[in-house]
Amino acid sequence: MIRAYQALQYNWFRKGQQRKIITTGKHEGAKLFAAINNETGHITHREEEQCDVNAFLRFLDDILENIPKVRSS
């Protein structure tokens, strides 16, 4: 998951000189699925609202649609 905010980390400040950290109060993020075809460099990606089995299956369908059809000889 990619978060739309920066995580706070532990820092040292002199007494009375602490930085004020502005926060949005929102914890938005994106659920992304992606795969790279190592032969062509083509990137298949999909953004979803939730990261669950159904979202992953939709992503797998996207990958299958982008695979070139192999002809049997």
Image (cartoon, rainbow, N blue to C red):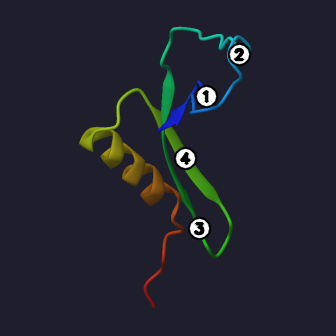
Front residue of this view, candidates 3 and 12: 12
> Residue 19 got which mark?
2
Q: CA distance from mark 1 to mark 3?
A: 31 Å
25 with respect to 56 (left or right): right
46 in relation to 63, above or below: above
In this figure, which residue is indicated by the disc labeled 4?
A: 45
Which structural element holds mark 4? strand
Quarter of the image containing the C terminus?
bottom left
56 in relation to 35, above or below: above
3 or 4: tag closer to the N-terminus: 3
5 with respect to 32 (left or right): right
Q: Position of residue 23 (x, y in %)?
A: 60, 11
In this figure, which residue is indicated by the disc labeled 1?
A: 6
Residue at x 56%, y 52% (from the top left corner):
44
Residue type, mark 4 in image:
His
Which structural element holds mark 2? loop
Furthest residue to the front? 15
40 in relation to 29, above or below: below
Q: Position of residue 3 (x, y in %)?
A: 54, 30
Q: Quadrant of residue 10?
A: top right
Badge 1: residue crowd in 10 Å (few <14, some 14–19, many ≥20): few
Q: CA distance from mark 2 to mark 3?
A: 45 Å
Residue type, mark 2 in image:
Arg
Camera-nearest label, 4 or 2? 2
> Residue 37 got which mark?
3
